[in-house]
Amino acid sequence: AQTVTQSQPEMSVQEAETVTLSCTYDTSENNYYLFWYKQPPSRQMILVIRQEAYKQQNATENRFSVNFQKAAKSFSLKISDSQLGDTAMYFCAFMKGDMRFGAGTRLTVKP
Amino acid sequence: DAGVIQSPRHEVTEMGQEVTLRCKLISGHNSLFWYRQTMMRGLELLIYFNNNVPIDDSGMPEDRFSAKMPNASFSTLKIQPSEPRDSAVYFCASSLWRQQGNTEAFFGQGTRLTVV
């Protein structure tokens, strides 16, 4: 089974600044999907951004963007202009048939 | 669409009792995932279905756990008998599976299970 590693259990950032969350994964597959999900204290799992492995262009969604390095099996999330509402757990996920998650990074945005 | 709907939102039960968690998929989705979330183990995939067929149940912890899809839009996860260590938040998620792969998965709001 594929494994997903998030090496930063906790991070913090000042409001309006930029932060990058790291994710690496292990797979022998060539075609797959990668996702970042956000889980605020309400515990709802919210999709932030997705990336298809066959696309070289990095995905962006407003203030959220990814740096996808397929050869390095790396998929980091950059949050620009951080807002207080971005405070949450962030999970990286790999999907090929099933979907596996990393352990998560707890992000705190400080005023 | 109302999204993925899970019930109940909270469940408190006594050890040894049977517990049934329910999940309604998004209309048109054909892939269903059950996850368990705990502080110690994070998000664990228990089982997933494509077109009502269980594809991988290797994450189901014990024979006390069972999952079914009686129809294309509904699934149940049953624990019998329940134990205190089963206490967790249980999520289901649905997606659209096609030959070239799945779309993103959409999650229900989860069921917080407490076994006392």
Image (spheres, coloured by chain):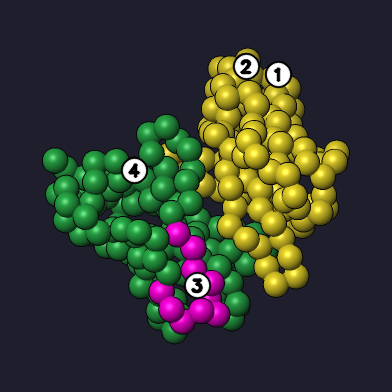
Chain colours: A green, B yellow
Judge whether A34 appears above or below B7 on screen: below
**What residue sits right under mark 3 in the picture?**
A26
Mark 2 closeness class: few <14, some 14–19, many ≥20 residues within 10 Å? some
Q: Nearer the viewer, residue B42 or B108?
A: B108
Task: Give the side of residue A15 with respect to residue A89, left or right.
Answer: left
Q: Are marks 1 and 2 in contact (CB under 8 Å)?
A: yes
On the same chain, marks 2 and 4? The answer is no
Disc 1 from disc 2: Cα separation: 7 Å
Inter-mark Cα distance, 3 to 4:
25 Å
What amino acid does circle 4 point to? Ala
Q: Residue A41 — which label?
A: none
Q: Where does the C terminus of chain B fall, quadrant-wise?
A: top right
Label 1 marks which chain's residue?
B
Q: Which residue is mark 1?
A: B17
Q: Which residues are drawn in magenta?
A: A49-58
Q: Residue at the spot x=21%, y=55% of the render?
A: A81
Location of residue B113 in the rendering, given as x and y in whole percent from the top left corner: 57, 26
Q: Which mark is residue B13?
A: 2
**x, y (%) of residue B17?**
71, 18
**Local SS, label 2:** strand
Mark in front: 1 vs 3: 3
Confirm whether circles 2 and 3 share one chain: no
In front: mark 1 or mark 4? 4
Dot 1 falls on a residue whose secondary structure is: loop
Q: Is residue A59 left or right of residue A3?
A: left
Q: Which amino acid type corresponds to the residue marked 1 in the rendered image?
A: Gln
Task: Describe residue A79's horizontal placement relative to residue B22 as left or right.
Answer: left
Mark 2 belongs to which amino acid? Thr
Q: Is residue B48 visible?
A: no
Mark 2 and mark 4: Cα distance apart in space: 29 Å
Dot 3: within a 10 Å radius of its alpha carbon, few (fewer than 14), some, or many (20 or more) residues?
some
Which residue is denoted by mark 4 in the rendering? A88
